[in-house]
Image: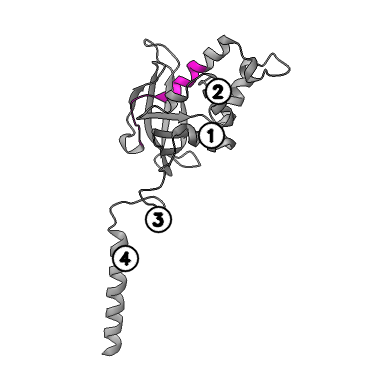
Amino acid sequence: MKKAIRYITAALFFSIILASFGCKEDYYDDGGILDDSVGVLDMTTMQYLEKHTESFDTLVSLIKLCGLEDSVDAKGSTFFAPQDYSIHNYFKLIFSDLDEWPSLSEFTDDEISGISDILKEYIVPGKKIIRDSLSTSYSYATTLGGGSARLNLTQEDYLGNVDMGATYIVYSFNVGTTDAANYQSVDVVTSDLQSTTGIVHVLSSTSHIFGFN
């Protein structure tokens, strides 16, 4: 009889433990080990980019060259951050006829203006775009440069099977015209970084060339 009671007590104990985890409202794909502080940056968007020189060293230099620091750090804005490798591939395109690329200090006014226009395509002013506000249906936002950005969630695993694997944000920009839209897309590899000034999403560097070329 005592043995049976011990089994019943143990079963009740494990049931309570499982229930305490299984009923948790905030569920994460990693099993619930995260908390609300994950992704909260105790710094501005520019400070975050400057801190991570391994990914954004060239990007930061271009932002400063174009005088767009305040735009990137504007309160309540969202910045879709292209990584340096994407910018490197852009330079390969525009300087393909040169044996040696010019330094940033040697860029012409027209080149700086062109880069500034491109950078503005990655800034959505006055709007904090977070993952929870998006769905598989398209939503749209206007960039700092006045262009049309399209956002949606998609799910795909490493084999290319849709509706399987991780769900991630796709950021698209219209490189076409109003009458004939042509949205070029890039995956977000790190989302919902909350700086003290806005939201940062890091873009894939392997499938994207700076400027949506």
Q: Are marks 1 and 4 in contact (CB under 8 Å)?
A: no
Judge left or right: residue 3 versus residue 111.
Answer: left
The residue that appears at 44% across and 38% down in the rendered structure is 43
Please state which of the two labelled residues, at mark 2 or mark 3, is closer to the viewer. Answer: 2
Q: Which residue is mark 2?
A: 62
The residue that appears at 46% across and 42% down in the rendered structure is 157
Q: Which residue is mark 1?
A: 50
Judge left or right: residue 104 versus residue 49.
Answer: right
Please state which of the two labelled residues, at mark 3 or mark 4, is closer to the viewer. Answer: 3
Quadrant assignment for the N terminus: bottom left
C-alpha separation, residue under disc 3 versus residue under disc 1: 29 Å
**Residue 5 falls in which quadrant of the image?**
bottom left
Residue 149 visible? The answer is yes
As shown in the figure, which amino acid type bears the numbered disc 3?
Ile
Q: Which residues are magenta?
A: 116-130
Query: Circle 3 sits in a helix, a strand or a loop, which is it?
Result: loop
Residue 18 location (% of width, % of height): 31, 65
Callout 4 crowding tier (Cα within 10 Å): few <14, some 14–19, many ≥20 = few
Judge left or right: residue 97 versus residue 71.
Answer: right
Residue 184 visible? The answer is no
Which sits earlier in the primary sequence, circle 1 or circle 2?
1
Callout 2 crowding tier (Cα within 10 Å): few <14, some 14–19, many ≥20 = some
